[in-house]
Amino acid sequence: MKHLLSTLFILLPSTALAQWASVSEPKEEVFSWTAPLWPSFWMAWTPATFALFCGIFGAIALIGLLEGFKLRDGLERRGILGLTTTLGDRLFISLLGSAYIFLAWLGLAGQPVWWPLAISMGWMVFCFWKV
Amino acid sequence: MKTENQKAWFFVLPVLLLVAFNALIPIMTVVNYSVQETFGNNVFFWQGLDWFEQILRSERFQAALGRQFLFTFLILIIEVPLGIIIALSMPRKGPWVPVCLVLMALPMLIPWNVVGAMWNIFTLPKIGLLGYLMNDVLGITYDMTQNPFAAWVTIITMDVWHWTSLVVLLSYAGLVSIPDAYYQAAKIDGASPWKVFRYIQLPKMKTVLTIAILLRFMDSFNIYTEPFVLTGGGPGNSTTLLSIDLVKIALGQFDLGPAAAMSLIYFAITLLVSWLFYTLMTKDDEQ
């Protein structure tokens, strides 16, 4: 019994010390797509949502530049839906359509969303190719 | 004619900045909220697409969405024909023109919450003029605080009273812009009033009617203040439209994540329907 107690007395501070050491150690920062990007900022950005908007604004900027300088009137044409569309219109239709593909999938089948991702990509290709 | 330079962009820039502040930044924030959970204090936890799944499958959301579509459909099929009929029967010349225009514009000048309060007092069964007339004079049971059907009739009537004028004024603007030569030609051909309406007036009103329908669709789909003040979404949930439900979730329950997901779904619906309306109604002009 005495032996056990003495062992405990030795062990307890050492475990505390061990913990203390682990607390004081700087944690290794691991990048996560879903962690807050700037924790105290009210817009609550995460790398994932930030990348989403970068993608959308990047696409708008690219098409804007293309329409403005390279391809006059954005390759206006009449597609298979009977609509006269420019590149910008096609981007809008593909983004709106993708949003609906994801929403429909989430409502009817639920997560994960790999399938709607594939379908939306197909939809985007279709929009820029045929619409 | 092709654009020769890009100077026009500088004129659009101030509007673009304004829109960035009052629309883009809030929408981006809502997207961020819709994939996270918060208990306040600016602390957020990743939630993925759970809120979207939850909202899309909730009966409460589906019911509110159904009510919203019904409301918008009813006010559009009443206000648009009624507005055109009133515009057609208004004088085109003479001293009565300004009188008619001012009378038509009056309901639109009243703030939305005042409209709700006015109609509330007007229709309450015991103290309201309409309530008293229906219940005590005509003997028709009418109580919008208890009966869902009466509540619906009241909010629809209130919206028709408030917003038909917009359709009237826009249609009227379209009508007065038609040159007399068209009517003279129709008279020479012996066209009936219906034919004059169908082949001269309606095509000439098309652009303004497109704008009127779009504005009425968007306004009625996003309506909040008037039914909230008038019925508060009741009796029960019978007049809880999407926006009322959204505010209940966001501010009443402080469920920012689900509320953000719901508002994005709401936004997607408004965007799609507005785009469809606009595309379909301007499609013929291109041909």
Image (cartoon, coloured by chain):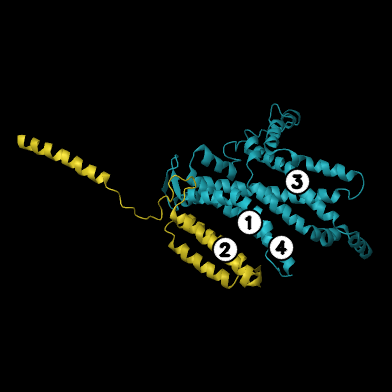
Visible residue check, residue A1: no
Residue matched to label 1: B273
- Give the SS element for disc 4: helix
Residue matched to label 4: B282
Tell me the subunit letter for badge 1.
B
Left/right of residue B227 with respect to residue B103 in the rendered view: left
Q: What amino acid does circle 3 point to? A: Thr
Visible residue check, residue B84: yes
Instruction: In the picture, one chain is cyan; tell me its letter.
Output: B
- C-alpha distance separating marks 1 and 4: 14 Å
**Residue A81, how many percent across, how many down?**
63, 69
**Residue B6, how many percent across, how many down?**
67, 65
- Pointers 3 and 2 in contact (CB under 8 A)? no
Residue A61: give its label.
2
Q: Nearer the viewer, mark 4 or mark 2?
A: 2
- Pointers 2 and 1 in contact (CB under 8 A)? no
Q: Where's the C terminus of chain B, which quadrant?
A: bottom right
Instruction: In the picture, one chain is yellow; tell me its letter.
Output: A
Residue matched to label 3: B164
**Residue B256, how many percent across, how many down?**
49, 43
Lower position in the chain sequence, tag 1 or tag 4:
1
**Residue B22, how many percent across, how many down?**
60, 48
Q: What amino acid does circle 2 point to? A: Ala
Lower position in the chain sequence, tag 4 or tag 3:
3
- Pointers 4 and 2 in contact (CB under 8 A)? no
